[in-house]
Image: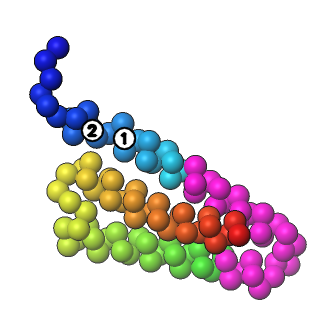
Amino acid sequence: MATTGKSNEASNPWPAIGMEAWALSMEASAVIGLRVFQRMMAGPGGNAESDAEAHRMIDEKMAAAWQLQVAMMTGGLGTTPAVATKKIIRHYSGKVRANRKRLGG
């Protein structure tokens, strides 16, 4: 079988993108668990910390979605589906990672 000189990712980026998406999903699951635990420990009536976290979560999700919409409308996500998907995953990965570190202590 002859090679073209291209790396596997250059010829088919989707397996690597799939792994990045899987890693994001695992980290997002951890953040969900940390938030649920925080809310559970606050008790039925909640507390100021868990209420603030719930509001922060909604604000962050709205801001992240808005940033991606602006990027899409201004061409900031690239010109191919693979490039756009990578940029979207990286956009969310940074935010999810920051939340995991903040919530995990």
Q: Position of residue 54 (x, y in %)?
A: 66, 76
Give the farthest residue toward the bottom.
48
Relative to 98, 80 lies left or right? left
Q: Nearer the viewer, residue 82 or 45?
A: 82
| Relative height, residue 89 to residue 66 (above, below) | above
Tell me the CA gap for discs 1 and 2: 7 Å
Residue position for label 1:
16
Check disc 2 and report the residue beneath it: 9
Q: Amino acid at mark 1?
A: Ala
Give residue 64's position: percent from left, percent from top: 43, 72
The kind of residue tagged 2 is Glu
Does the stretch in magenta take in 49? yes
Residues in magenta, as a range: 26-53
Instruction: Tell me which residue sits at (82%, 78%) in the image.
Output: 46
Give left or right: position of 34 versus 63. Answer: right
Element marked by disc 2: helix
- 105 relative position to 23: left or right: right
